[in-house]
Image (cartoon, rainbow, N blue to C red):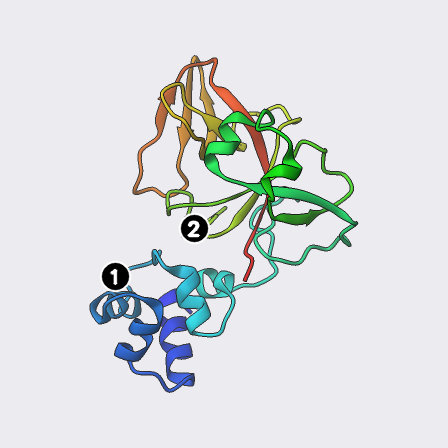
Amino acid sequence: MSISERVKQKRTDLRLTQSELAKRVGISQQSLQKIEDGRTQNPRKLLNLAKALDCDAEWLLLGTTNEVRENTSHYINDDQTSQPFKNNLRPIITAQQAAQWPNIGELESLKLKHLEVTDTVSATAFWLKVIGDNMMSSSGISVPEGYFILVEPTLTANSGDLIVAKLADSKDVTFKKFVVDAVRTYLTPLNSNYRPIEVANDLQIVGVVTQARIMF
């Protein structure tokens, strides 16, 4: 079953017209029609659509839930893990704060929100909310807009890792796949509609992304 069929099925189950669902999601009826007829495979407002349809965003996109999207334990695309959480918290910070991390003053004075982590996560790790659809893919690893990613500054980035990095001419950070090809280094989006960015070898890597969660 495709995403178009899942959207149509849930809409029908809820007895909503296309117009009613589109209004709840905040898109036009024409945009919803493109989703249902298969012309749009990666809806921009996936989270809004999942909420309006009262279902899990991961299931809506891929037809699966509680699934690790690759053969490692690094990327978790749901809000439940197989390991029990300890009483550890890490802050949710902005892209601008991440560019200065950890030199952003006393955390207590910033009144940051926090999310739980396992006891293996370092004290300098932080959460960052994904903005935009450049890391959303219809196959393999996919991190849609609205997900929260856990960034681990203590890890060394290897080619193929998902990372958060700061470009020299930017005041915030970017979330991309780190690719080293011979003597060239790239920041590569998972969304094939976007092009890789060639960067200097001395790129400032803020941290390696170890988890991605959807939080309702």
Q: As displayed, is residue 54 above or below residue 38? A: below
Q: Amino acid at mark 1?
A: Arg
Where residue 28 appears, as percent x and y from the top left, is 23, 67
Which dot marks residue 82? none
Q: Quadrant of residue 9?
A: bottom left
Where residue 103 appears, as percent x and y from the top left, is 59, 24
Where residue 68 appears, as percent x and y from the top left, is 60, 52
Residue found at x 40% / y 60%: 46
Quadrant, the N terminus: bottom left
The residue closer to the viewer here, 211 or 184, is 211
Q: Nearer the N terminus, badge 1 or badge 2?
A: 1
Q: Secondary structure at mark 2?
A: loop
**Marks 1 and 2 in Cβ contact (< 8 Å):** no
- Label 1 or label 2, whichever lies nearer to me, is 2
Quadrant, the C terminus: bottom right
The answer to whether one can see residue 14 in this image is yes
The residue closer to the viewer here, 140 or 98, is 98
User: Which residue is outermost to the front?
Assistant: 109
Real-space CA distance between mark 1 and mark 2, rounded to the nearest whole angstrom: 19 Å
Number of other residues with Cα within 10 Å of mark 2, as a class: few under 14, some 14 to 19, many 20 or more: many
47 left or right of 156 in image? left
Identify residue for label 1.
39
User: Which residue is outermost to the bottom?
Assistant: 15
Q: Secondary structure at mark 1?
A: loop
Q: Amino acid at mark 2?
A: Glu
Identify residue for label 2.
145
